[in-house]
Image (cartoon, helix red, strand yellow):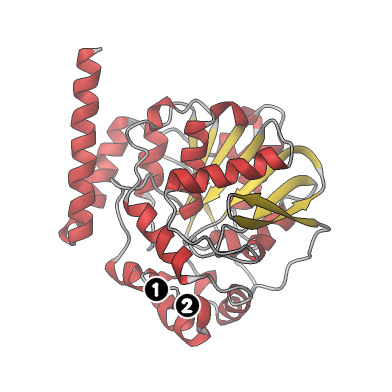
């Protein structure tokens, strides 16, 4: 079954979204303090894990869309209002920081949404502590090494945190990073560049996150994750191509993929994103299988994945694409050998 594509509605330029009532506190993890916000509400608490160099305020559109849900957001060390960690972190280390927040706030179990870089952290967190995660949403993310990387120009733009410091650089690189109509809208760019610059990432944390992505892969164990998972991806994502969503969905035993048509990588900052309804229903419904996100999504068969991979491997001509393809094929071969032995 081919994943359904929900086309983005004609959006008006982004406007500031209404802010929800929240409480803030600090969570101490080792030698650093992390800034945490809690938005009171009903239903199961939802923990949001943000992307590369990002801070809590960049969640405002999604937090507003989640409405009455209880929501937890936080800043990793060196981002937003959190202290800087003196040493680089790995994906497992970032996942343990997220677990520290869950523990300190007294939650036995939470729902988790991981976006982009945060999606890798969310995968690791769910793999390491499956009893603590009720439902998982993976948005615009990838399994790490073995993925299909984005366009070289997009990768170049991500190689520096300068777009958080310079509005001019952010707008110049947007030509490489934008996906979908809304991300090319001047008013939307003006709004998002303002929010982005509220808290600039510390270079140590930014490059630590970049390096951590190159040392992580979930493809070895993704098939063991039983947590109900909604994989959400824009079909016009130049940073993390949509094939990566298909790859994860095919490997996860209890997952559906929701494709947001003509939307790009920054869909979580678009108040009009078609993905918001899918995400909120997935977390809110008593049975996730009854949610609009689950019913509007689809499984990805191995045959469909193979066809998608043939198309995606056209990017293997670039060095990083070839590297990931070799790793992906090696992991596939190892998995086939493991199955024969068992």
Quadrant of the image containing the C terminus? top left
In the picture, measured across the screen, residue 95 lies left or right of residue 223, that is right
Q: In which quarter of the image is residue 303?
A: top left
Q: How crowded is mark 2: few (under 14 residues within 10 Å), some or many (20 or more)?
A: many
Of helix, strand and loop, which one carries label 1? loop
Q: Are marks 2 and 1 in contact (CB under 8 Å)?
A: yes
Relative to 338, 258 lies left or right: right
- Judged from this view, the residue extending furthest toward the front is 31
Q: Which mark is residue 163?
A: 2
Q: Please state the horizontal and vertical placement of residue 13, each as a whole percent of the image.
A: 63, 75
Asked if residue 232 can be seen in this view, the reply is no
46 shown above or below 55: above
Left or right of 90? Residue 155 is left
Residue 41: image location, x then y, percent: 82, 45
Residue 291 in view here:
yes
Q: Is mark 2 on a helix, strand or loop?
A: helix
Which residue sits at x=67%, y=61%? Answer: 61
Label 1 crowd (10 A; few <14 / some 14-19 / many >=20): few
Question: How many marks can you see?
Answer: 2
Q: Mark 1 points at which residue?
A: 160
Q: Residue at x 33, y 67 (%)?
A: 155
* 85 and 221: which is toward the camera: 85
Residue 145 coordinates in the image, percent (x, y): 30, 47
- Answer with the quarter of the image where residue 82 lies: bottom right
Q: Residue furthest bottom?
A: 168
Question: How far apart, in angstroms, are the residues tagged by discs 2 and 1?
Answer: 7 Å
Label ID, residue 320: none
């Amino acid at each position: 079954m081919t994943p359904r594509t929900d086309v983005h509605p004609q959006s008006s330029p982004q406007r500031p979204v209404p802010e929800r009532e929240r409480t803030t506190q600090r969570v101490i993890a080792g030698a650093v303090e992390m800034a945490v916000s809690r938005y009171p509400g009903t239903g199961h608490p939802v923990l949001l894990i943000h992307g590369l160099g990002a801070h809590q305020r960049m969640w405002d559109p999604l937090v507003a869309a989640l409405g009455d849900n209880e929501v937890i957001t936080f800043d990793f060390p060196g981002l937003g209002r959190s202290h800087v960690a003196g040493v680089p972190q790995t994906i497992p280390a970032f996942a343990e920081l997220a677990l520290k927040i869950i523990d300190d706030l007294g939650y036995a179990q939470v729902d988790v949404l991981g976006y982009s870089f945060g999606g890798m952290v969310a995968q690791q967190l769910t793999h390491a502590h499956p009893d603590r995660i009720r439902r998982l949403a993976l948005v615009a993310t990838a399994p790490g090494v073995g993925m299909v990387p984005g366009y070289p120009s997009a990768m170049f733009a991500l190689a520096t945190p300068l777009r958080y410091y310079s509005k001019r650089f952010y707008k110049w690189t947007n030509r490489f990073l934008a996906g979908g109509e809304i991300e090319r809208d001047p008013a939307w760019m003006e709004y998002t560049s303002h929010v982005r610059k509220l808290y600039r990432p510390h270079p140590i944390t930014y490059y630590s996150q970049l390096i951590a992505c190159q040392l992580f892969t979930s493809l070895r164990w993704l098939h063991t994750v039983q947590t109900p998972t909604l994989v959400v991806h824009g079909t016009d994502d130049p940073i993390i191509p949509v094939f990566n969503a298909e790859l994860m969905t095919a490997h996860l035993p209890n997952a559906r993929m929701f494709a947001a048509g003509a939307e790009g990588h920054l869909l979580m900052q678009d108040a009009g994103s078609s993905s918001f309804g899918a995400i909120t229903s997935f977390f809110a419904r008593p049975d996730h299988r009854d949610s609009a996100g689950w019913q509007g999504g689809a499984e990805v068969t191995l045959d469909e994945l193979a066809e998608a991979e043939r198309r995606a491997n056209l990017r293997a001509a670039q060095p990083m694409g070839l590297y990931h393809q070799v790793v992906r094929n090696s992991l596939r071969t190892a998995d086939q050998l493991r199955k024969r032995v068992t």
